[in-house]
Image (tube, helix red, strand yellow):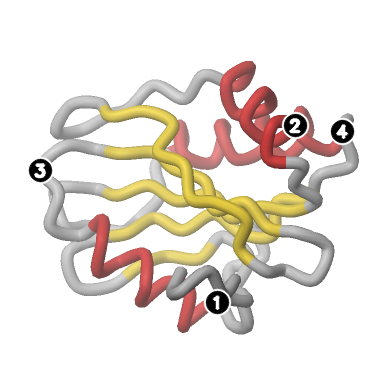
Amino acid sequence: MRDGAREKVQTPRRTIEALRRYLAPLEREVFAVLWLDARHHVIEFDVISTGTVDSAQVPVREVAKKALERNAVACVLVHNHPSGSCEPSPADEFITRTLKDALSLFEIRVLDHFVVGRDTAYSFAEHGLL
């Protein structure tokens, strides 16, 4: 965000590129959430957890708490794979479904989950997994 102006999430590709620049160089797996208002303007970007070289714990309760604190109506989930591969694991698919279901109880939509690799990223929404 620049000069107090809230940026709008317009396309998956633009969002992925912005997040990839931040997450791709990291040596540990990081799980974060981009919180959005009703017009898909960015409210906040929160790093939820930092893990090891090949995993990060995702506390569902903490994600729900942050969503309510931010008064979000939508979000974009994102995490990196320090290995460089952006292929989602079965655990990635499971946590995506779990968070989507949990946040839906509070009427918060998960718009996408990006897995960021070294040179590219994977969009769950673009692959029909949301």
Instruction: Name which residue lies at 74% across and 47% down.
Output: 72
- Between circles 1 and 4, the one closer to the viewer is 4
> Disc 1 to disc 2, how far (Cα)?
24 Å
In the displayed orientation, state which residue is furthest to the front.
3
In the image, residue 103 lies at what x, y percent?
77, 35
Whether tag 4 and tag 2 are in contact, CB under 8 A, the answer is yes
In the image, residue 18 lies at what x, y percent?
37, 73
Tell me if residue 78 comes above or below residue 95 in the rendering.
Answer: below
Is 76 on the left-hand or right-hand side of 107? left
First of labels 4, 2 by sequence position: 2
> Disc 1 to disc 3, how far (Cα)?
24 Å
Tell me if residue 69 comes above or below residue 43 in the rendering.
Answer: above
Numbered label attached to residue 68: 2
First of labels 1, 2 by sequence position: 1
First of labels 1, 4 by sequence position: 1
Q: Which residue is mark 1?
A: 12
Numbered label attached to residue 106: 4
Viewer-closest of 95 and 78? 78
> Disc 1 to disc 4, how far (Cα)?
24 Å
Instruction: Name which residue lies at 34% across and 56% down.
Output: 87
Viewer-closest of 113 and 23? 23
Amino acid carrying label 4: it is Phe
